[in-house]
Amino acid sequence: MPEVTRFLARAFAVVVPLFHGGGTRIKVLEAFAAGTPVVATRKAVEGLDALEGAHFVVAESADEFVAALVALWTDHARAAGIAARAQQLVRERYSREALCRCVALAIRKLDASTRGTLPGGQA
């Protein structure tokens, strides 16, 4: 299976018209990471720390999707800004490095909270 990143990087936008369902938002994060602007329903980015207008463009109907895509197509500076902020969000919150920082912090907190609770003061 070819890596999707190279296709996303060539697209001017990614459309995510998700109205029902759940699960992970990997496709949205992949588009963010590739630096490709995203036009999506609120459902499509549910659970992510993405902000409307800053990290993605929201659209809830076919007409709104068309209008959002035309706006991004004609305003390259806006599209580039949205893509750059979304890419930064991925680096800060969803990258492997960010995950490692969160896990390390959780382990330190757990260690600190359990220190001295075992017999003999062993952690």
Image: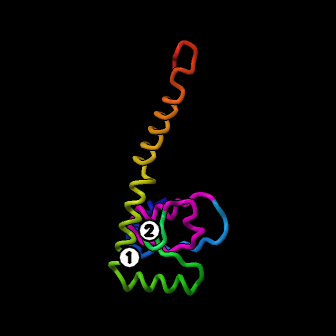
Which label sits in the foreground, 2 or 1? 2
Q: Nearer the viewer, residue 12 or 39?
A: 39
- Expressed as whole percent of the image width and height from the top left, the position of residue 19 reads 64, 72
Residue at 42% over, 68% down: 7
Mark 2: few/some/many CA within 10 Å (<14, 14-19, 20+): many
Residue at disc 2, secondary structure: loop
Residue at 34% over, 80% down: 76
The number of numbered discs placed on residues in the rendered structure image is 2
- Residue stretch rendered in magenta on the structure: 23-49
Amino acid type at mark 1: Ala
- Expressed as whole percent of the image width and height from the top left, the position of residue 44 reads 57, 67
Q: Is residue 32 magenta?
A: yes
Q: Nearer the viewer, residue 40 or 30?
A: 40
Q: Is residue 56 magenta?
A: no
- 1 shown above or below 97: below
- Expressed as whole percent of the image width and height from the top left, the position of residue 116 reads 52, 20
- 110 shown above or below 21: above
- Looking at the image, the residue that sits furthest to the top is 120
Is residue 35 toward the left or the right of residue 60 in the image? Answer: left
Q: Earlier in the sequence, mark 2 or mark 1?
A: 2
Amino acid type at mark 2: His
For disc 1, the marked residue is: 79
Can you tell which mark lies on residue 55?
A: 2
- Expressed as whole percent of the image width and height from the top left, the position of residue 86 reads 41, 65
Coloring scheme used:
rainbow
Residue at disc 1, secondary structure: helix
- 67 shown above or below 17: below
Is residue 113 toward the left or the right of residue 32 in the image? Answer: right
Mark 1: few/some/many CA within 10 Å (<14, 14-19, 20+): many
Residue at 60% over, 71% down: 18
- Looking at the image, the residue that sits furthest to the right is 20
